[in-house]
Image: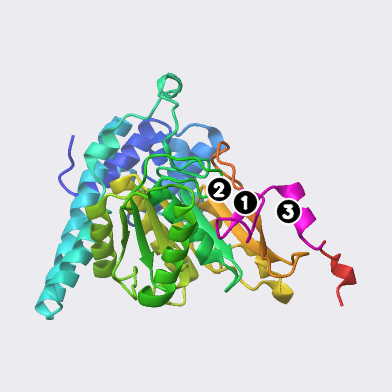
């Protein structure tokens, strides 16, 4: 059943709520409705929460307590299934949203806005329109889950990242975070383990968006350093499938720039995408939540299109008294909920002069228990950074002083 208009569809939702004890509100929230239907929906929901069922008498009493006209005879359409109401509401809500977006696009066109900007904004807006086909998909049952293939995606960097996994890495400024990231990326491209254990695997395709390092100097130096290290571990080195995005500045909040970037990545179908630094991927708008979500959604679109693992470099906040806020990413706490791996590289003072040490802090729990990121890294050996586990690392590092003993 498809409603003639959106008002009819909202009447179907209310009728389904009365018919089926408000179970429709698991699919269509009361706040999704317009006034006055929203107020009536909240009244029906309140009755169900109080009594576990919905009757006309209790609904009328609830409306009286809220001092609203129940409008029962105006919206009731008889017995109604949740599925009928859901489909009708999805269709008409989508139609109204479509007409609103098209009207806005025409207004921008008439005002002389660039066609490409109008098209990109319209594509983004249309992607949010609910579709009946998606709503009709059946949820997985318990037995469906048990019958699924439980094989994890294959490794992009063995022991560290699989296809589709997300890692956000923070660290001290100027202490080798970018060097480690390019060690990981070039190891994937050459098919040599970046853990300096000599393990070889099928070379991966790698795409990099580096908007912090100058490509001709700093980035080139990082790549040459990694190539020199890997040349001592695999001979001959394969010609890497490794691409660097040409952008020197980017604002992923801008729909056109975001879509162009995703299109460039999609063209190369990489196994690993490196992006950073996080604070330079968007133009600041004063809302850290939006800025963080924009980067995450861009990365998730890339994962959906390519299956790639994503490694994002960003900075840790300064925190209180310079404690770097537990090495969590600067800005929105949304970062804490998103990646499979959240790693902060804390500089530690080495016992031996001329060396550098960084300890890996998990600022969120790992989602993949088979991945084993090292306890720390030291700058000695063939590779720029060599992994070391806890005992070895603490032997190399000067012990931390208790907070109360610091001068």
x then y, percent, for residue 209:
36, 65
- 46 over 207 or under it: above or below: above
Q: SS at mark 2?
A: loop
Q: Earlier in the sequence, mark 3 or mark 2?
A: 2
Residue at point 34%, 69% (across, down): 253
x then y, percent, for residue 344:
61, 60
Question: Would residue 370 be found to the left or right of residue 56 on screen?
Answer: right
x then y, percent, for residue 347:
67, 66
Marks 2,1: beta carbons within 8 A: yes
Residue 321 colored magenta? no
Q: SS at mark 1?
A: strand
Q: Earlier in the sequence, mark 2 or mark 1?
A: 2
Question: Would residue 22 be found to the left or right of residue 325 on screen?
Answer: left
Tag 1: Cα neighbours inside 10 Å, few (<14), some, or many (≥20)? many
Q: CA distance from mark 3 to mark 1?
A: 9 Å
Q: Which residue is mark 1?
A: 387
What colour scheme has been applied to the protein in the rendered image? rainbow
Q: Which mark is residue 393?
A: 3
Q: For this rendering, which residue is in front, 330 or 164?
A: 164
Magenta stretch in the rendered image: 374-398
């Amino acid at each position: 059943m498809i409603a003639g208009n959106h008002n009819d569809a909202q009447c179907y939702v209310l009728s389904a709520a009365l018919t089926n004890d408000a179970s429709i509100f698991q699919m269509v929230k009361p706040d999704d409705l317009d006034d006055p239907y929203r107020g009536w929906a909240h009244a029906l929901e309140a009755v169900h929460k109080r009594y576990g069922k919905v009757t006309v008498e209790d609904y009328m009493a609830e409306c009286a307590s809220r001092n609203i006209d129940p409008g029962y005879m105006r919206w009731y359409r008889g017995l109604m299934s949740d599925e009928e109401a859901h489909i009708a509401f999805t269709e008409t809500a989508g139609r109204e949203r479509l007409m609103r977006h098209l009207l806005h696009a025409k207004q921008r066109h008439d005002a002389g806005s660039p066609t490409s900007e109008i098209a990109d904004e319209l594509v983004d807006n249309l992607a949010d329109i609910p579709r009946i086909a998606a709503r009709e998909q059946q949820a997985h049952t318990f037995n469906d889950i048990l019958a699924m293939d439980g094989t994890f995606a294959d490794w992009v960097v063995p022991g560290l990242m699989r296809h589709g996994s997300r890692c956000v890495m923070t660290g001290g400024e100027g202490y080798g975070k970018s060097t480690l990231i390019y060690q990981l990326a070039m190891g994937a491209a050459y098919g040599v383990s970046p853990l300096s254990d000599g393990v070889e695997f099928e070379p991966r395709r790698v795409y990099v968006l580096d908007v912090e390092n100058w490509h001709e100097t700093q980035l080139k130096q990082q790549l040459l350093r990694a190539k020199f290290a890997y040349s001592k571990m695999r001979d001959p080195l394969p010609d890497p499938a490794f691409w660097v995005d040409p952008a020197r500045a980017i604002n992923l909040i801008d729909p056109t720039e975001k879509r162009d970037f995703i299109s460039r990545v999609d063209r190369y179908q990489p196994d690993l995408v490196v992006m950073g630094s996080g604070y330079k991927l968007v133009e600041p708008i004063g809302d850290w939540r939006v800025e963080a979500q924009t980067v995450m959604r861009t990365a998730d679109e890339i994962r959906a299109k390519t299956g790639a693992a994503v490694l994002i470099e960003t900075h840790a906040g300064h925190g209180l008294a310079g404690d770097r806020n537990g090495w969590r990413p600067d800005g929105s706490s949304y970062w804490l909920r998103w990646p499979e791996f959240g790693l902060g590289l804390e500089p530690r003072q080495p016992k031996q002069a001329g060396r550098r040490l960084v300890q890996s802090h998990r600022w969120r729990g790992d989602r993949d228990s088979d991945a084993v990121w090292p306890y720390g890294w030291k700058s000695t050996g063939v590779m720029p950074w060599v992994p070391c586990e806890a005992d070895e690392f603490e032997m190399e590092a000067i012990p931390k002083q208790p907070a109360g003993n610091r001068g």
